[in-house]
């Protein structure tokens, strides 16, 4: 009898994230995961418990890698509006360069599961709250630096910027090129 195949659970979560990101939760079968991870179904369930548990780990991995990258860009040095424009352009360029046009896994999950799965909705809501908070902090910094009018509601602008990102990520999935996305980015930054 041969030894069971060893696998790295962290690498498996990364691979599962790619599958869920590309196909969505409902369309991803346990067999899709087994094929992507290169393990048996028994090993999949022994390691992660269920497809659902693995999905939550994958969504958290997405948050910890992809969503934090945006926040790090917003925290760089330089003029606030330049940082915001750079971060939004990065998102658009990344989405357009993706041959699968996956968009944002959090946005996709909200669209797919928010009305039927409170746990998934809560996880995405917390991700969005974190991003919105980073935008609010950026706006407040811009207000202190004189780049953004001090009388404007930083919380409302943070919400507006989050909404712009969600729309941008959805539009990028079907965009024929960068023109419309560039207009959205420029208008979003210019309105500040």
Image (tube, rainbow, N blue to C red):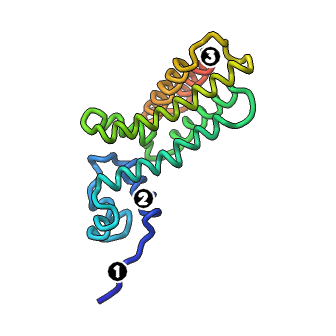
**Above or below: residue 111 compared with residue 62:** above
**Above or below: residue 139 compared with residue 20:** above
Examine the image and state in which quarter residue 2 appears: bottom left
Q: Would residue 54 be found to the left or right of residue 166 on screen?
A: left
**Which quarter of the image is occupied by the C terminus?**
top right
Q: Would residue 53 be found to the left or right of residue 98 on screen?
A: left
The secondary element bearing badge 3 is classed as: loop
Q: CA distance from mark 1 to mark 3?
A: 58 Å
Badge 3 local density, few (<14 within 10 Å), some, or many (20+)? Answer: some
- Please give the name of the residue rendered at 51% of the width and 21% of the height, measured from the top-left corner: 160
Q: Residue furthest bottom?
A: 1
The secondary element bearing badge 2 is classed as: helix
**Above or below: residue 81 compared with residue 38:** above
- Answer with mark 2 or mark 3, whichever residue precedes in sequence: 2
Instruction: Say whether marks 2 and 3 touch (CB < 8 Å).
Output: no
Examine the image and state in which quarter residue 170 appears: top left
Q: Which residue is mark 3?
A: 192
Closer-to-camera residue (129/102): 129
Badge 1 local density, few (<14 within 10 Å), some, or many (20+)? Answer: few
Closer-to-camera residue (157/140): 140
> Which percent across, then down, holds residue 187?
58, 18
Q: Which mark is residue 13?
A: 2
Q: CA distance from mark 2 to mark 3?
A: 39 Å
- Answer with mark 1 or mark 3, whichever residue precedes in sequence: 1
> Which percent across, then down, holds residue 56?
36, 50
Q: Which residue is mark 1?
A: 4
């Amino acid at each position: 009898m041969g030894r069971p195949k060893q696998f790295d659970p962290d690498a498996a979560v990364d691979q599962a994230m790619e599958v869920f990101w590309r196909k969505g939760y409902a369309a991803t079968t346990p067999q899709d995961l087994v094929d992507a991870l290169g393990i048996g179904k028994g090993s999949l369930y022994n390691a992660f418990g269920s497809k659902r548990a693995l999905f939550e780990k994958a969504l958290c991995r997405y948050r910890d890698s992809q969503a934090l990258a945006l926040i790090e860009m917003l925290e760089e040095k330089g003029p606030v509006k330049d940082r915001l424009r750079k971060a939004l352009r990065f998102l658009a360029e990344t989405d357009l360069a993706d041959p699968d046009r996956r968009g944002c896994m959090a946005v996709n999950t909200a669209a797919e599961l928010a009305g039927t799965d409170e746990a998934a909705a809560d996880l995405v809501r917390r991700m969005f709250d974190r991003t919105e908070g980073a935008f609010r902090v950026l706006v407040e910094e811009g207000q202190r630096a004189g780049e953004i009018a001090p009388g404007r509601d930083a919380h409302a602008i943070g919400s507006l910027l989050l909404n712009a990102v969600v729309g941008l990520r959805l539009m990028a999935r079907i965009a024929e090129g960068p023109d419309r996305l560039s207009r959205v980015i420029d208008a979003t930054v210019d309105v500040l």
